[in-house]
């Protein structure tokens, strides 16, 4: 089945690709496996220098790569540029810290000398999403390639040009051809790749159902897996501390990437003393949003990535309204256009509370006690991230009681190379970024010398 690159704002089909044949996939696996044997043996300094070159390539090609994201998934140019800058920073972070993260770690043995050696596993498959088409890939690739692994990328089917451009960046930086390869394949090809003995692990960022499917295949073949899945993150407002700023951050947290982010704030849990003021200010910000062509310089909001995603979001909103929620804002305008909206009166059982709303819709409800706020924040099958806003000591105490992979205090949830990233519950398992992320696809081998 052909793979299409389509502009979500205009509906224009940009280009069409053929799926990779089974022989091409076999050749790619063999090349990755063969290259691994020499790549892992290269001095770390050699791999680090290539990672630094990769950062330079990204920065040099920023404009072209940002334009690709605007064309294929509707990300405005300013956000695309920022994404590429973040990818380059990630490469530099691991270039700077790889030696420390990978050095032998001494152990307190009862006698003799004992230590842990971190050695790469081999060929790792990356199954990546469309919402941050470069960042999601580079936060996987930078740590695992510098540690000595090789990688195969199965990217989302709606961003094939981005997927091919990523592989081209590695080529331009001078990496051996088998270190990183893009495969234009459907999801149905993943099980056969994971069944191959030469492939030693898989990292997936995507939906809950995709995660379950890939995890089952990985387990069936005894392969290591890391899953970063959905989120329905809580944004807890405890008091009126700097409320104007908090509302600005709430809007930014909900509308980042047009709300198409696993760690975007989705459930706003606001103390009753500031609830009405919070909703009023948030309503004003949402109402001011103007959706424009993402290729237009100065655009701040574009379309959703695909028409069917906007339609699915609209169905979740409609069902929540039918169950008693109140919608503020126009919402769905057809095709891939969705005007930011607020849902009030959201309760347990509604899609707006139970499911992930992957688009620009904020679900807001009030609370009266801190205990209630903690209960509401934890009342989700997801646990990817969240934030708590208010007086610092009180907010930090609440953050420590929220069951999530990360909780930020008085700042919006965002990934950073230095901070471990990953969820609990139905948001997945394993870590990305920081030293924890680098170690995921290494063998922490214990050596004890008598």
Image (cartoon, grey):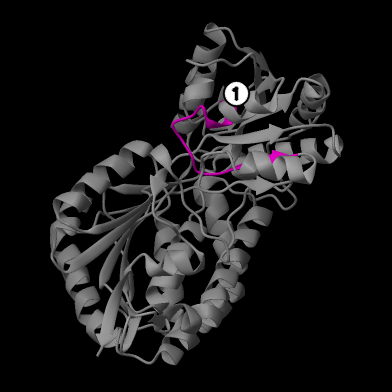
Magenta stretch holds residue 378: yes
Total numbered badges shown on the rendered structure? 1
Which is more toward the observer, 247 or 154? 247
Decide: is 29 above or below 342.
below
Relative horizontal placement of residue 25, taking residue 378 as reference (left or right): left
Residue 227 at what x, y percent from top left? 37, 50
The quadrant the N terminus occupies is top left
Q: Quadrant of residue 235?
A: top right
Query: What is the magenta range?
Result: 376-389
Relative horizontal placement of residue 178, taking residue 132 as reference (left or right): left
Disc 1 crowd rating (10 Å Cα; few below 14, some 14-19, many 20+) is: few
Q: Quadrant of residue 388?
A: top right
Residue 308 at what x, y percent from top left? 44, 30
Magenta stretch holds residue 131: no
Badge 1 is on which residue? Answer: 333
Residue 325 at what x, y percent from top left? 60, 12
Decide: is 345 above or below 81.
above
Q: Tell me what residue is drawn at x 32 percent, y 41 percent.
A: 210
The quadrant the C terminus occupies is bottom left
Decide: is 90 above or below 303.
below
């Amino acid at each position: 089945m052909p793979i299409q690159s389509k502009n979500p704002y205009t509906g224009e089909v940009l280009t069409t690709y053929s799926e990779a044949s089974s022989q091409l996939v076999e050749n790619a696996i063999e090349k990755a496996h063969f290259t691994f044997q020499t790549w892992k043996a290269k001095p770390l300094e050699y791999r680090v220098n290539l990672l630094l070159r990769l950062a330079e390539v990204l920065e040099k090609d920023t404009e072209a790569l940002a334009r690709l994201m605007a064309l294929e998934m509707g990300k405005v140019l300013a956000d695309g540029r920022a994404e590429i800058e973040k990818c380059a920073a990630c490469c530099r972070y691991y270039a700077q810290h790889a030696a420390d993260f990978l050095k032998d770690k001494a152990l307190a043995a009862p006698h003799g000398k004992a230590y842990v050696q971190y050695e790469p596993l081999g060929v790792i498959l990356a199954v990546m999403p469309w919402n941050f088409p470069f960042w999601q890939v580079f936060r996987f690739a930078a740590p695992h390639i510098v540690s000595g692994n090789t990688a195969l990328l199965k990217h989302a089917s709606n961003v094939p040009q981005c997927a091919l451009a990523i592989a081209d960046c590695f080529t331009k930086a001078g990496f051996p051809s088998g270190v990183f390869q893009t495969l234009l394949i459907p999801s149905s090809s993943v099980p056969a790749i994971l069944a191959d003995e030469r492939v030693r692990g898989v990292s997936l960022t995507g939906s809950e159902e995709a995660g379950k499917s890939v995890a089952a295949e990985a387990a069936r073949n005894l392969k290591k897996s890391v899953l970063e899945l959905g989120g329905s993150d809580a944004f807890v407002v405890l008091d009126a501390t700097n409320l104007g700023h908090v509302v600005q951050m709430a809007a930014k947290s909900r509308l980042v990437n047009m709300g198409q982010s696993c760690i975007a704030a989705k459930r706003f849990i606001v103390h009753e003393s500031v609830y009405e003021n919070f909703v009023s200010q948030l309503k004003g910000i949402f109402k001011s949003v103007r959706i424009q062509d993402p290729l237009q310089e100065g655009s701040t909001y574009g379309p959703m990535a695909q028409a069917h995603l906007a339609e699915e979001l609209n169905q979740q909103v409609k069902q929540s309204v039918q169950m008693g929620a109140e919608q503020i804002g126009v919402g769905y305008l057809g095709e891939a256009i969705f005007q930011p909206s607020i849902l009030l009166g959201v309760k347990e059982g509604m899609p707006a509370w139970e499911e992930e709303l992957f688009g620009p819709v904020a679900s807001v409800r009030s609370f009266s006690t801190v205990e209630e706020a903690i209960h509401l924040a934890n009342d989700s099958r997801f646990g990817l991230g969240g934030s708590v806003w208010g007086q610092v000591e009180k907010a930090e105490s609440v953050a420590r009681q929220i069951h999530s992979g990360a909780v930020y205090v008085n700042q919006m949830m965002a990934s950073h190379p230095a901070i471990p990233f990953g969820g609990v519950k139905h948001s997945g398992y394993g870590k990305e970024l920081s030293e924890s992320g680098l170690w995921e696809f290494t063998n922490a081998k214990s050596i004890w010398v008598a």
